[in-house]
Amino acid sequence: MRLRLRPRGGARGPSLNGEHALHRCNCRPDEKGASLTLAEIEPGRSVEVCCLDGDGPLARRLAELGFIPGTVVEVLRRAPLADPIEFQIRGYLVSLRREEAGRIRIRAGLRDASAIAQGEVVAALAEP
Amino acid sequence: MHGHNHSPSQSFHHRSTVAAEQPHTHLVALTGNPNSGKTTLFNCLTGSHQKVANYGGVTVDLREGLLRANGELWRVIDLPGMYSLSAVSPDEEIARDLIVFGFGATGRPDLVVQVVDGGRLERSLLLTMQLIEQGLPLVIALNMFDEVTRRGLLIDPDRLTARLGVPVVPTIGTRGKGLDRLTEAIKGALDGSRPEPLHVRFDPQTESALEGIEEVCRDAGAPVSRGVAIGLLTREPSAGRGLPAELVRRVAETVASGKPGIGGNWTDAVTHARYAAISDLLAGAASVGGGRGDSRTARLDALFIHRLWGIPIFLLILLTLFQLTFTIGAYPMGWIDAAVSWVGVLFKAVLPGLLGEVVADGFIAGAGMVLIFLPNILILMMGIHLLEDSGYMARAAFLMDRVMRLMGLHGRSFIPMLMGFGCNVPALMASRTLESRRDRILTMLLIPFMSCSARLPVYVMVTAAFFPRNGGLVIFGLYLWGVVVAVGSGRLFSRTLLKGQAAPFMLELPPYRWPTARTTFTLLRFTTKMFLRRIGTAVALAATVIWFLANFPRPEMAAGPSAYSHHSYIYHIGRVLEPAMKPLGFTLPMDIALVSGFIAKEVVVATMGVLFAGNADAGTETLVEQLRRQMPGTASALAFLVFVLLYTPCLTSVVTLQREARKWYWTTFSIIYQTGFAWVAAWGTYRMLT
């Protein structure tokens, strides 16, 4: 599994080119200091969105499609050539390329798809 | 007349004059997320026959129709789909502009009908929130309500109506159900008895920022609506339109001084608050999230986009389609061919002298030859239509995204490119659904390599003569070769002329649906009509002109072995072309046919019909038999097919490209590149086989 390094910087004001820099959020880095994105989740699992990187038109559109903090996303499958990835979110199917999926950070603590189907409330795994 | 798609001249701009003649009618706009069934509903309401399919982005222009309801006449406009009023592509901008700013003399609509796919209710309501903020009367058509029932989703329209303050009417566009209640609701809302619509409360920081903006604007004497204030806050580029630049700058300062409460920026805060409002709204009124979704779709997807089988199945489906086009089409083709030759003989016998020759050897031999291929075209178009309407095409885009990326293209470019297999003209227009200009230009340069249905007659004719056993395979190979050339050219262009990254890829996969008989029938009727119209105009004219060029000036002595004498104009034209085309193994009539093919590809067949039909000993020979006798052989036949596949598709496509790209150098480049490439590829094919 390819891990992305979490960019540093924390909250900053709008930069000159109109893109906000990353904001701080509560997605918990694992022991190696990296946080997971949707691009890294194996098909068949459900996860919860933590935040989106950036705030350009792409981030806006992803948010409008429903990828906002707290939303549960199920990773359905990858295309035969590994890209794009199909997700189920808010009752519909959408596919994103790895690159875009990589801008959606998820909460640490994966949830099992069957658990969601049974409507269980699943607690996030405790951090170490 | 209203309603037929494809023709660029029927776009909204040209028809606004029609609209201006009826100033006293209400203007009703249909809007909603892509693929929510707006056009299907529009067709039902206005009796139009616009193209529909089961994927987003089919409608890229405004279409207008009239609806008579309870003695009133309304103008109904069908808009391209959009996810949100913050548009990211030209087709979304068209829809946004009409609703938010109004279009020239048309102005803003009097009422907006948001068409909502019941299966994707939660997300659709985000647009509802934005539309409410625009302050226009709103009615919601809760469409595809049959699917809602089938999937076991629970939606209570009355409760939603009460909570939203907006009428919510269940409809089933494909079966024309719920239309009476919908028009009643529209009428009620137009007559003015409207409850106060839902007002979304944002978090305190956002609310105070919005109030700050509203205050600044009010003080400057330019009060703005909630919708505009939110646009200004979230730095939506179009929000400042129509406001003084100075004011926009002051607003930006006000915004910069505040600090968002949720997430890292105002967009997050606003979207978050809207989704929170939506989940409050749906609690107890509808099932949220849609559970496990649609089991039929899940089962079919497990097969069609399987990691291993997905791509082989896709190729198999295409190969089957081309084989069917070739084999089934062969039966009616033979009958039409015989009928056309018989009619030609008849006219020659009845009409005296020169007139008989013009009609029989020019008009009938040319236009009639093209007519033969109507069955093939109908079979192919119907196959493509079934794939589109069932939802499979969106899966094909999913499977092929990686291939698209090889070309430096967006996965969504796949849909315009696929439409190119039908006709390049609407495909070029469909490139509007792409977000970046670079992607659009690149897609438009590659679309002509998608073999359109007008090229099919040439393939069928030549393969029937030279590859009677495996015609389907040869045709499939040609289509595939077109795709390969597009991929190669795409790679080349994206590394040289059009550097840069493809815009982000987001593709919705719609549920699988049964194609309806009505849309299939409409498509077949429309295809036939367009085809006959082309035969009756461009093809017939070109065939007659070719006949004259081939027969005049007349030699004193009897004609030689070929249809054209060495005195004729066409011989002289052909002689000019000959040196350029000789290396490809083409003969003079083939050269002439290719030149005439710049007008349209059907003309290639017509020209060959004319040039061969006048042959003294042609007698009752069919065109296929004549071809076999008069074309030099398999190698040059295949080179000819490759040339036809790759060079400029038709005059209309050139005009459309110019209109969409708006730069003459792209149009010129496109023509030169295609024709140059066609020559090189045909030469390569010929040399390899000889």
Image (cartoon, coloured by chain):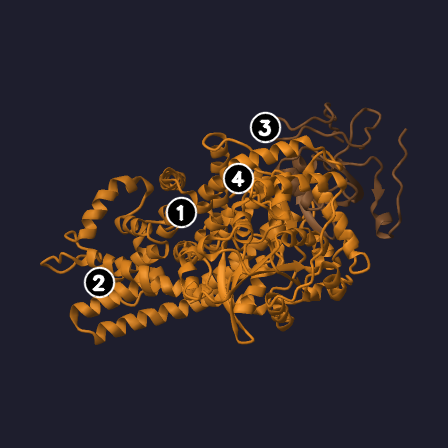
Chain colours: A brown, B orange
**Where in the figure is residue B287, as x and y percent of width and height?**
79, 58
Residue type at the position of mark 1:
Arg
Mark number for residue B616?
Answer: 2
Q: CA distance from mark 3 to mark 1?
A: 32 Å
Q: Is residue B640 above or below residue B10?
A: above
**Where in the figure is residue B542, as x and y percent of width and height?**
28, 58
Instruction: Check contact, mark 4 vs mark 1: CB within 8 A.
Output: no
The quarter in which the C terminus of chain B is drawn is: top left
At horizontal 31% and vertical 46% (from top left) the residue drawn is B586
Direction from residue B137 to residue B681 in the image, left or right = left
Residue type at the position of mark 3:
Asn
Q: Which residue is mark 1?
A: B659
Q: Are dots 1 and 2 on a single chain?
A: yes
Q: Nearer the viewer, mark 3 or mark 1?
A: 3
Residue type at the position of mark 2:
Ala
Earlier in the chain: of badge 1 and badge 2, it is: 2
Direction from residue B634 to residue B63 in the image, left or right = right
Q: Which residue is mark 3?
A: A17
At horizontal 38% and vertical 41% (from top left) the residue drawn is B667
Q: Which residue is mark 4?
A: B436
